Image (cartoon, grey):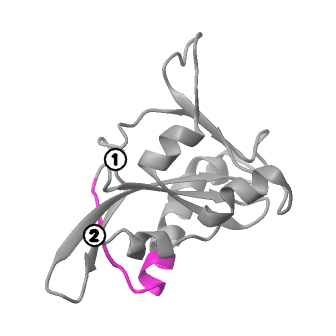
Amino acid sequence: MDYRNTASYGKRQEYIAVAKLLEKGFDVYMTLVDDQGIDCVIRIDDKKGSLRYLDIQIKARSKDAKQGHTFAAMTFEPRENLFFIFFTECNGLYWVIPSVELAKLCHQNKTGANEGKRHLTLPKLSVGTKSDKFDIYKNGFNLLWENIH
């Protein structure tokens, strides 16, 4: 992959994920800058007149990445209305994970330049113990609808 494609890969995948959200019936509002770790906001109407807003952070790894299933150096404060959408190109999957659950699934770096930051390794295979643990999040856009309280 040349530099131009590498540099724009994350942004392209961000827009594709937003298109997926729109396709699934979500009202999506894009942010101008990602200085709060929020790529977009979705509005959910619970059909009882109550609206709920969810902050969405989108992350993607290309098939050419050395570790195509690992998302490193993440910083976030878990909260009920923050969700992550991860895309792994090597298997073409989206993983939708609430930040509260993500914090439990991540490992936190104890030393080094990324001390205190979190990293997550998603399953490479579609079967097995690790895959089973993450199965609920695989293409789990329904988790966004289910988040209505």
**CA–CA distance in space, label 2 to label 1:** 27 Å
Is residue 137 placed above or below 64 in the rendered structure? below
Question: Which quarter of the figure has residue 149?
Answer: bottom left
Q: Which residue is mark 2?
A: 149
**Residue 72, quarter of picture:** top right
The reply, left or right, for residue 24 in relation to residue 67 is left
Q: Residue at x 45, y 76 (%)?
A: 21
How crowded is the residue under tag 2: few (<14 C-alpha within 10 Å), some, or many (20+)? few
The residue that appears at 78% across and 63% down in the rendered structure is: 91
Answer with left or right where residue 143 lies relative to residue 5.
Answer: left
Q: Could you tell me residue 44's position as x and y percent?
A: 28, 77
Vertical comparison of 145 with 130: above or below? below
Q: Residue beneath label 1, please?
A: 34
Q: Does residue 119 show up magenta in the picture?
A: no
Residue at x 34%, y 47% (from the top left corner):
34
Nearer to the camera, 121 or 29:
121
Q: Residue furthest top?
A: 111
The x and y percentages for residue 144 are 42, 70
Residue range (magenta): 19-32
